[in-house]
Each structure stands twice: as structure tokens, then as C-alpha cells.
Image (cartoon, rainbow, N blue to C red):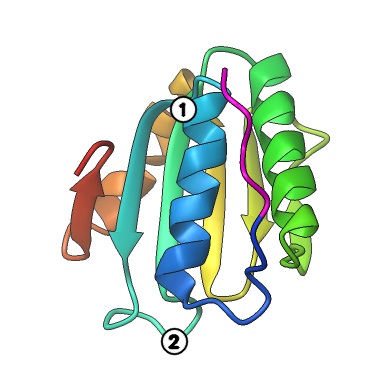
Amino acid sequence: MSEIKTVNLSEAEPKQIAEKIIEVLEDKLAANVQLLEVSKKTSVTDYFVICSATSSTQVKALSDEVEVKLTECGVSPTRIDGAAGGDWTVLDFNTVILHVFTKTAREFYKLDKLWTDASAKKEGE
């Protein structure tokens, strides 16, 4: 794992915030990270970042790390949901919403498929 560089994102574009979230997730070994641009499909947000974790413990670790690192960069989530359940946590950064799932929960909810019309960008693109 590398050192995540702290940058000021308080006035950043939504895509820059999403890219920082992805950087943190990849550093913490999240699996199957996807970036979906949904701005043309919903007024709720511009991007979804979706990833999988190997366990509820990793769901919490990934969520906590993104919260800490993004807050250090000047962007705090306005809402966090699902932290107590362990299988799915949502961090809402207004223009970017992060969904952290266990593999089983991700397969059950199929959020990726619900947004298939969104422009999907897989990890590494």
C-alpha cells in the first residue's frame, strides 16, 4: 500500500473527487471498482463509485479509510448509511456516491445492472 497524497478537493470537479475515492479504494485493495457517470440519468449525483470487499470487516475498513482520506482533502460525506449492517455501506459526497458491498450483497442488489445505461468505466481505464 502506498501513501495517499493529500490534495485540496474542496472546489474540485466531481470526477476528481471520484478519482481520489478510487485511489483510496485501490490502495486498500478493494475489488471490482467501477466508476459510473450517472449525471444524465439522475439529478441525485454525478457519479457512483461501486466496489466489492471480501468481508464486512473490509467494508468498514474501506468506508472508514475513504471517509478519513477525503475529509483530509477537504471533502466530507454529507451522509453515511449502512455502516451498522456490514454488507453494504454508502458514503454520500453529494456529487459522488460511494457504494461498498460485500461480494454477496453486490450480487444480490445488482446496482451495477440497474445503471447499465450509465457510462461504465472499469478499474484501470
Q: Position of residue 76 (x, y in %)?
A: 77, 64
**Residue at (63, 28) in percent of width and height:** 87
Crowd class of label 2 (few under 14; some 14 to 19; many from 20; radius 10 Å): few
Query: Is the N terminus in the top left, top right, bottom left or bottom right quadrant?
Result: top right
Q: Position of residue 6 (x, y in %)?
A: 68, 51
Q: Residue furthest right?
A: 84
**CA–CA distance in space, label 2 to label 1:** 25 Å
Is 118 placed left or right of 7 in the picture? left
In this view of the protein, which residue sits in the foreground, 90 or 2? 2
Q: Which residue is mark 1?
A: 52
Q: Is residue 67 visible?
A: yes
- Amino acid of disc 2: Ser
Q: Is residue 52 above or below residue 47?
A: above
Q: Is residue 97 above or below residue 89?
A: below
**Residue at (53, 13) in percent of width and height:** 54
Range of the magenta residues? 1-6
* Tag 2–tag 1 contact (CB < 8 Å): no
Which type of secondary structure does the marked residue at label 2 adopt? loop
- Amino acid of disc 1: Ser
Q: Which residue is mark 2?
A: 43
Q: Is residue 58 magenta?
A: no
Q: Is residue 4 magenta?
A: yes
Q: Is residue 121 above or below residue 106?
A: below
Q: Quadrant of residue 7?
A: bottom right
Q: Position of residue 85 (x, y in %)?
A: 76, 32
Is 32 placed left or right of 109 in the picture? left
Dominant secondary structure of the magenta stretch?
Answer: loop
Q: Quadrant of residue 31?
A: top left
If you read the primary sequence from the N terminus, does the residue marked by circle 2 or circle 1 appear first?
Answer: 2
In this view of the protein, which residue sits in the foreground, 74 or 55? 74
Q: Position of residue 64 (x, y in %)?
A: 77, 37
**Residue at (57, 23) in percent of width and height:** 2
